[in-house]
Amino acid sequence: MSDEDDILFEITPQVLLRAYACGIFPMAQTADDPGVFWVEPDMRGVLPLNEFHIPKSLKKVMRNTSMRVFMDRNFKAVIESCSETTGSRKETWINPRIKDLYCQLHEMGFANSVEVYNGAELVGGLYGVRLGNAFFGESMFSRQSNASKIALVHLVAQMKKSGFMLLDTQFTTAHLERFGVVEISKTEYQLLLEEALVGESQFDLSGYQESDGGVMSDSCLQSFNQIS
């Protein structure tokens, strides 16, 4: 989409939701680029929930860590953290316009965050869009070893528990492939998406809210084994 098209076609939260329902999502060239363009990959990354794999080394970490996990405790802090550059990530596609749009989606109840805390410090997490029985993972970050991986395990456990059908990772990476992410064609993805948009799932936030004090990862592993 050109800059002119972007100006003429205002992107609103409602437009975003319609785009996701069609298998399209937005990105920016860089954090400093005010424009947004639409992406529809020919090959799509998805994580089959029933084939989700937790590496043994991560299970060991989760059984022994004191980190706690919350959902939707501070969505804005998560998307801000995902937009930061790091030593291994020199550029980011999350610009201020995208941050504002997804914060609006969160306020409307269509975007969620999974947050990992070490004490009072936010050390990792992820965010994405919830629509129907699908969750579209947008980005994740980690300031402490394994923190984003722990967030992913908690997300999948909650999705399985709550009856979700599709976890869209958009693209595949070596990091995600360790958990079972596969790449499928646009045609295959559209069929999965169409099925997942029938009905609606809601996250069960029991234990994950501020008043509950968060969830320890060892208890998440136990619940994950019960629903697997």
Image: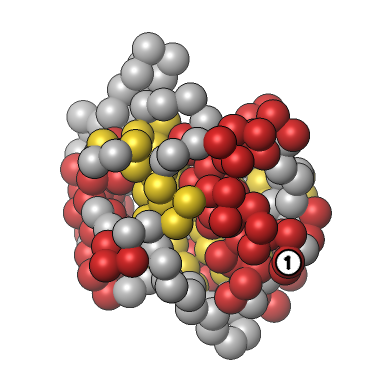
Quarter-of-image position of residue 189: bottom right
Q: Quadrant of residue 191?
A: bottom right
Q: Residue at x 66, y 34 (%)?
A: 60
Decide if residue 4 is on the left or right side of residue 45.
left
Front residue of 125/105: it is: 125
Front in this rendered view, residue 139 or 207? 207
Task: Look at the image and tell me whether residue 173 can be seen.
Answer: no
In the drawing, does residue 138 fall left or right of residue 198?
Answer: left
Front-most of residues 193 and 173: 173
| x and y, in percent, of residue 41 in the image | 61, 46
Find disc 1 in the rendering and name its residue.
226
On screen, residue 25 above or below 180: below
Q: Residue at x 45, y 56 (%)?
A: 215
Q: Position of residue 3 (x, y in %)?
A: 26, 43
Placement of 114 over or under 211, stated as above or below? above
Which amino acid type corresponds to the residue marked 1 in the rendered image? Gln
